[in-house]
Each structure stands twice: as C-alpha cells, then as structure tokens.
Image: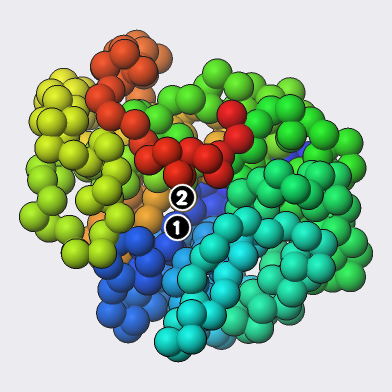
Amino acid sequence: MNKRYLGKDKFPVSVLGLGCMGMSFGYGGSEESQAINTIHSAVDLGVTFLDTAEVYGPFDNEILVGKAIKGIRDKVQIATKFGFKILPTGKGVERMVGVDSRPEHIREAVEGSLKRLNIEAIDLLYQHRVDPTVPVEDVVGTMAALIKEGKIRHIGLSEVSAATLRRACEIHPITAVQSEYSLWTREPEDGILKACRELGVGFVPYSPLGRGYLTGKIIDHSGFADDDFRRTLPRFQKEAMQKNQQLLVRLQNVADKYECTLAQLALAWVMSKGNDVVPIPGVRKIEHLQDNVGAASLLISENDIKAIDDIFNPETVHGLRYNKGDFDLIER
C-alpha cells in the first residue's frame, strides 16, 4: 500500500489508517484475540497507521493495541490522544468526567499511554478535545517539550476551529488535525480543511464510513449491542435512517458503475479530496478490513465525485451527527 505524508514535517503513514476504538469501546467491543488478529491482518495488508486514545475504555484500547504491536513496533505508526479527565468510580472501573489539558495532566497522560502501549515514544499525539480553561499555546508548548524529551514525535489536534489551529501553529508545527469527515459529515470543507491546507497541516478523518451506515449494511438497531452509543445518535434514529437510506440507493448506482462496494466508494471519495487526507475507518472483522483496503486502488472520475457530492450534502442528509453534549466539546 502506498504512503501519504502528514504536515510540513512529512510524517509518513499508510494511505489508509485503522481506527481501533470500536474494538473495545463505543460499539459493544469485541473479543481480544479477534481484535489482535484484525490489527495484525491490517499491518500485513499495509495498513500501518493505528489510531487509539486513553479515553477509549478508558484505557482498554491502548492496552489492546499495545499487545497487538508487540514485536512489530517498527512496522506501525501509533497515534493516541489525551484531553479528558478520567477518574475511578470505586467499582474497579474509570469514567470520563470532562476535559483536562493542564500541562501537568498532559504529562501524566503521556506517561500512562506509553506504559499501556509499551512503547518508548508516541508517533502522533493529539489533544482529543479543546480545554477552554487552558490556552492552546500552553498545550502545544507542553507537547513541544515532550518532543524534545523524546516521548512523542509529532503533534496533532482534534475537532478544533481554524482560529485555534492558527494559534497552535504559531507555537510549533502541527502535523495533523483529526475531525469527523465523510459523505454525510461535510462540515470540515467549510473551515478547518481549508485552514489545514493554508498552514501545511495534514487532515485525518475519523468515521469516514459514517459509523458504518455508509456501508449500506445497517438498516436498523437490530445488530447493535445494548451499549452501542449509536443507539443515542440523531442520525441513527428510525426516521432519519429511513430517509438517509434513499441517499444510499442513489450511491449504489455509482458503486455499480465501478463494480465496488459502498464502503469502498465512500472511502475512495474521502481519499480523493487530497493527498494530505488520511482516513482512519474502524473495523472489527478481517473481511471488512479487506474490503476497505480495496478503496486504496479505486479511482473515481471527477464527474462522479461531483455526482456523489450532490447526493450527499447538508441539505439532503437527515439528522445531526452528535447530541448536544457531544457538540459542546467540539470547536466550530
């Protein structure tokens, strides 16, 4: 698989990454051996850019990734994130109780991530969500110090505004911004993606398959685990799903032309938006991984890209991507 390069420092990653969150968090989780086999298969297929975060679990996903990359550290690029306050509940589990990007907490989080991942340095460290009580200058300054100390190699930000990104770049080059971006989540095109291009920052879309919906295989909630958080999202409510299904019918016509799956077409569309764009779809099954990899060699004509743009746009997509509490943590 070919590589793409993020940021002015040209951080090399696979053209398609792997979002590991769903293997242990958010969607009901999966069996550990299956998850590790999937990660190993990804690396064998050339998907070497692995994405995790301390809050996924919390902590469980980093531990899982750490186990999976044992013995193959030199073959992968590891991205993780800090930025949430995680406290014990007294019942043997932890819970997220808000944001925390104080410099001392950043250092604590990095030490924890290094230990759980069992690595000497994090390739790409993101601030997961902006902390309104801590200036981004202090956050990036702390991360820059961690680079000098050899604990991290590149700096990223997640779900930030263009204004915050510009301030951050004044302190230290930012390698990548991570935001949700897909056929049915086009907001980055209006601001942050343009700012990334202006500033020489790579762009890493999460949920490029619309949390699975754009594969065309989700009709209702019947396949969701009880603790699958999609059950609570506006776009996954019955009426919205039924209306958005009509968009998938139109998209299928384009997929048929290319003799590809909907997932491959949706990912190829994201990758067509620039060589500085590296999507990180999440998978739990090897067959889904193999399907996604096929998107890396799929070239869509300019006319068909425009046709797809017209099918999915803010006027045609029904339902918001998050609930209000989630949006409160996102800069816009």
Residue 231, visible in the rendered structure: yes
Q: Is residue 109 above or below residue 118?
A: above
Q: Nearer the viewer, residue 316 or 298?
A: 316
Q: Amino acid at mark 2?
A: Ile
Q: Is residue 39 left or right of residue 216?
A: right
Question: Which circle's residue, 2 or 1, is located before the other in the chain?
Answer: 1
Where's residue 282, x and y in %? 37, 56
| Above or below for 90 versus 213 | below
Kindly indicate the quadrant of the structure image that contains residue 317.
top left
Horizontal relation, residue 211 to residue 3: left or right? left
User: Based on the displayed image, in which of its 4 quarters is residue 182 positioned?
Assistant: top left
Task: Indicate left or right for 254 with 282 as reference.
Answer: left
* Quarter occupied by the C terminus: top right
Q: Secondary structure at mark 2?
A: loop
Name the residue at 34% across, 31% down: 320
Which mark, by number, is residue 280? 2
**Label 1 residue SS:** strand
Residue found 62% across the figure and 56% down from its top: 99
Q: Amino acid at mark 1?
A: Leu
Q: Toward the viewer: 307 or 79?
A: 79
The disc at residue 18 is: 1
Residue 209: % across, % down = 33, 42
Mark 2 Cα within 10 Å, few/some/many (few <14, many 20+)?
Answer: many
Place of residue 327 in the rendered image (x, y in percent of width and height, measured from the top left): 48, 38
Instruction: Report the number of numbered marks.
Output: 2
Is any part of residue 291 visible from this angle? no
Up the image or down, 149 lies above or below 27; here it is below
- Report which quarter residue 146 is drawn in: bottom right
| Mark 2 vs 1: CB contact within 8 A | yes
Report, in whole angstroms, how far the alpha carbon at label 2 lies from the one at label 1. Answer: 5 Å
User: Residue at horizontal 74%, vertical 23%?
Assistant: 198
Give 110 or 155, whichever is nearer the viewer. 110
